[in-house]
Amino acid sequence: MQIKRFEARTMTEALKLVKDELGPEAVILSACNRRSAGGVLGCFKKPGVEVTAAGGGPLPPLHPLTTAKDCRGGELEGLGYPAATRRLPRPNRFPGSALPQSRMPVKRSEAEGGNRAVDRAAEHWLYRRLISRGVEEKYARQMTTDFLRHANGLADDPAVHRSRIAGIITQMGASVKPLAIENGQQRRVALIGPSGVGKTTAAAKLAALHALDPDLEVALLSLDNYRVAASDQLRVYADIIGVPAAVVADQAQLDEALEKFCRHDLVLIDTPGINPRDAAPIRKLTGMLEKIEGLEVHLLLSAAARMCDCVDLFDQLTGLPVERLMFSKIDETNACGSLLNIALRLGLPVACLFDGTTGPDGLKDADLETLAALVTDTNGAGSGATAAPPAAAAPGDRE
């Protein structure tokens, strides 16, 4: 292998020099225009060309350490030939596809079909109803899409619609688990939640409901010695219902009260309100409750509460094994959709629903059709609520 550089006035002359010197099988490695030396102060130089060629055998393999500086310098030190360079292909940042996902071609029919499905859900009466009731947009869209998927086979009957919506929210993860008490179980249930949510009233309603069963022994126990007249309120409830009650302030009194009620089938424990921004009372309450053997912790929230506040509160209860949710004040809001949002977000079953009615009449065990009615009915909540399309809906809406 022989590599040489040739200079001439024209390319034709340079090629002739290459052929004469290296033979007809010579390979041109590079060529460029240049001016010959001479002239005055660099002026009046004669134009010419410079050609680098190789001949006399095959080219050696390219050296991996070849640099751009070597190419500009002409012959490489130790190699005897100019380096050849090429641009490497850009790596594919989206393995498995020839184009980035955002640039992948989409069939017009598929894109239009997806848009039509979205538009159809957003225009449906159920979607509008759910949004107006406070259901989060992602849940409302999912529920409406699933409802429309089987809408053609559904009768235009409120009961059928309510049953279908109940099935949809079940598939989404909502569940119920009522507080069923049987003789001889000896259940210990603590109601926890923020201040003003109605824990004392809820405990009294639960006690009144189960005290109606002559085979059950029920007792009330309060740890709320912070709120003014809280203990007096509980004792009044207990006297009206006809069940024993105790108010405790420390661990020793709690142990004594639990020993006193050890033969009762159900002991309902009222607790002070929780402030998620005050960790000290939460730690004290956790320390007392975690020592109760077989304790069930139920979180009581308002049906009108904001989901972000409920999630913030739940995150502070890491030391308490919350098993179920209860919701109060379902008759004080027209936006019970928050109830469904919270249940789906926390992933806990709903046990009971409370309203402002006095006595056990204001208590209802949760069931899926009632939850469906609460998030779709516009005429008020309750067991008689129905999930039905508006009476004046257009034919296209009543699907």
Image: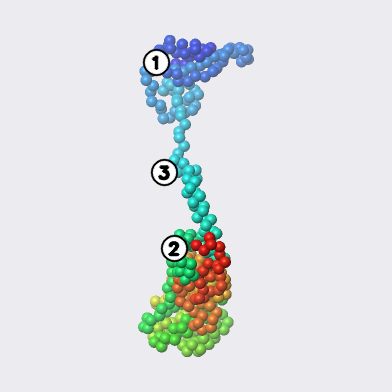
Distance from Cα at disc 1 to Cα at disc 3: 45 Å
Q: How many marks?
A: 3
Up/down of 307 relative to 290, above or below: above
Q: Residue 211: horizontal and vertical position, in percent?
A: 44, 86
Q: In the image, what residue type sits under mark 2?
A: Gly
Q: Residues within 10 Å of mark 3 (few under 14, many from 20)?
A: few
* Quarter of the rendering occupied by the N terminus: top left
* Horizontal and vertical percent position of residue 168: 45, 64
Please say whether residue 386 is visible from this viewpoint.
yes
User: Which residue matches tag 1?
Assistant: 25
Classify mark 2: helix, strand or loop.
helix
Residue drawn at x 55%, y 59% as measured from the top left: 123
Of the two numbered discs 2 and 1 on the same chain, state the one appearing first in sequence.
1
Single out the residue that lies furthest toward the front: 395
Type of amino acid under label 3: Gly
What separation in Å lies between label 2 and label 3 (alpha carbons)? 40 Å
Mark linked to residue 96:
3
Pointer 1: residues within 10 angstroms few (<14), some, or many (20+)?
A: few
